[in-house]
Image: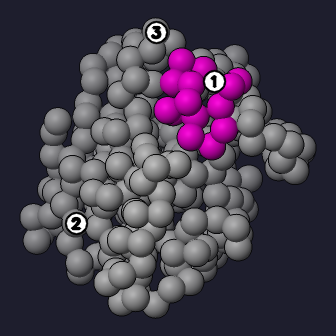
Amino acid sequence: MKEYIVDNLKNKMRYHDFPGEDTPILFIHGLGCAGSFDYPEVAAQVDLINHRRILVDLLGSGFSDKPDNYLYTVKEHAEYLCNFVKSLNLHKFIIFGHSLGGPIAIELADKCKDSVETIILSEANLDKSSEDSSSYKFGSFREDDFVNSIFDEVINENAIHNSMWTAALSVCSSTAISRISKSAVEGGNPSWREILYSLNCKKTFIFGEKSLPDDDQIELKKHNINIQIVKAAGHSMAWENPKGLAEAIKKGILYARLNF
């Protein structure tokens, strides 16, 4: 694992950087997750093995630092990731973003327009959080209440029936989870959907088969966004079918190259 110093306070983001000759893929994880937890098995699949694969743990998550002085908004994550990819001299790269990592991926792509080969999203937030989402529930609490009691209650309630997510969530900063959830509830301005539609690069959106039907499957096609479906998986497709997710990501890359 490597580390990147984010700011003058020496806060560090940690990440895996697996070598490969093909275009680097930057993996951005979702709420309560970590790149180091979610994506090693996906990155190891034969479809992606020739790519350089960069798996980040966002600040506040996984093995990265968890400073309380960060706002942890979608925009703030995108800003330091923009500096990060510049520090790696990534003149051309692919962005993958899952769930609430999707808005971060979209804002990053908007900042790095000339360097993005393609953006690939899996069941990403395109609009402000819906009332049935975890981010809406977390973001609707007062921060002090969430940090001091509700976060632990969420861990305990999910420990059995959603143990993988609980394992990753339990090592996140409760402050970071609260703040990025509030950012998701507020949404983007312009919306992340509008930014996505405006990007000039080719775009792919991945659904898990178990998450369908979804109205966005039709809506996104209207905006020339390539749709891929991971069989035998739902929202947590990196854990449920890592091979299928890797295949879908590769199809998204080939779609961009064949339709350049």
Q: Which residues are magenta?
A: 231-244
Which residue is label 1 attached to? 248
> 118 left or right of 51?
right
Identify the element where label 2 is drawn.
loop
In the displayed structure, 126 sits above or below 189; it is above
Assess whether residue 242 is covered by the magenta stretch: yes
Residue 165 visible? The answer is: no
Q: Residue furthest front?
A: 160
Circle 3 residues within 10 Å: few <14, some 14–19, many ≥20: few
Q: Position of residue 189 (x, y in %)?
A: 63, 76
- Name which residue lies at 29% across and 76% down: 70
- Name which residue lies at 70% across and 24% down: 231
In the displayed structure, 63 sits above or below 229; it is below
Circle 1 residues within 10 Å: few <14, some 14–19, many ≥20: many
- Name which residue lies at 63% across and 24% down: 248
Distance from the alpha carbon under mark 3 to that under mark 1: 12 Å
Sequence-earlier tag: 3 or 1: 3
Residue type at numbered disc 1: Ala
Identify the element where label 1 is drawn.
helix
In the displayed structure, 134 sits above or below 160; it is below
Which residue is label 2 attached to? 66
Residue type at numbered disc 3: Val
- Rendering quarter of residue 209: top right
Identify the element where label 3 is drawn.
loop
Which residue is label 3 attached to? 46
Tell which of 211 and 65 is nearer to you. Answer: 211
Residue type at numbered disc 2: Lys
Q: Residue furthest top?
A: 46
